[in-house]
Amino acid sequence: MKVVAACMLAALGGNASPSADDVKKILGSVGAEADDNRIELLLSGLKGKDITELVASGREKLASVPSGGSAAVASPAAATTAAAPAAAEEKAEEKAEEEEEDDEFISNIFDED
């Protein structure tokens, strides 16, 4: 993920096709280690492609992915009554998971192995 982020930062900085050295420099600036194999794999996949177009394409694909789900309920009133507590509980669980992921991500940024 950090290699992808470094590539995106390079692109945002005006470098449309960053090199492995560019990615390593960005990662090194924040104390992250660069894995040459992952960098080369990503750069070979990006070769000849516009990062902006790839992001736009990914957004379109993501928009078509169904999210959530619900069970069939007999009446609209019952659906509202039954779904409210479940939705609140699910939302709380999702928020807790997101916070854990954010904490892990942030701790990895500042992790000095």
Image: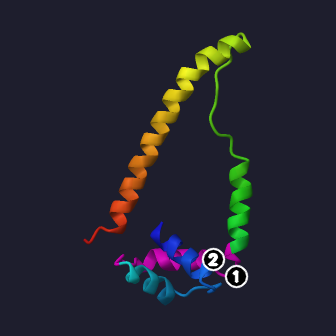
Q: Is residue 66 above or below residue 36?
A: above
Kind of residue sitting beneath label 2: Leu
Q: Which residue is most to the left?
A: 113
Q: Residue 69 sits in which quadrant? A: top right
Q: Badge 2: few (under 14), some or many (20 or more) residues near its Cα, within 10 Å?
A: some
Residues shaded magenta: 31-51
Percent x, y of residue 90: 51, 31
Please report the residue visible at 40 percent of the width from the left and 77 percent of the height from the top.
35
Horizontal side, residue 76 vs residue 87: left or right: right
Kind of residue sitting beneath label 1: Gly
Which residue carries the number 2 mark? 46
Q: State how many labels appear.
A: 2
Residue 77 lies within the magenta run: no
Please report the residue visible at 44 percent of the width from the left and 86 percent of the height from the top.
25
Task: Please tell me whether mark 2 sits on a helix, a strand or a loop.
Answer: helix
Task: Please tell me whether mark 1 sits on a helix, a strand or a loop.
Answer: loop
Which residue carries the number 1 mark? 48
Percent x, y of residue 10: 56, 82
Q: Badge 1: few (under 14), some or many (20 or more) residues near its Cα, within 10 Å?
A: few
Please report the residue visible at 39 percent of the width from the left and 83 percent of the height from the top.
29
Q: Is residue 85 above or below residue 53?
A: above
Please report the residue visible at 67 percent of the width from the left and 74 percent of the height from the top.
51
Say which of 40 and 62 sits in front: 62
Answer whether labels 1 and 2 touch (C-beta < 8 Å). yes
Say which of 82 and 43 sits in front: 82
Quarter of the image that includes the C terminus: bottom left
Horizontal side, residue 28 vs residue 9: left or right: left
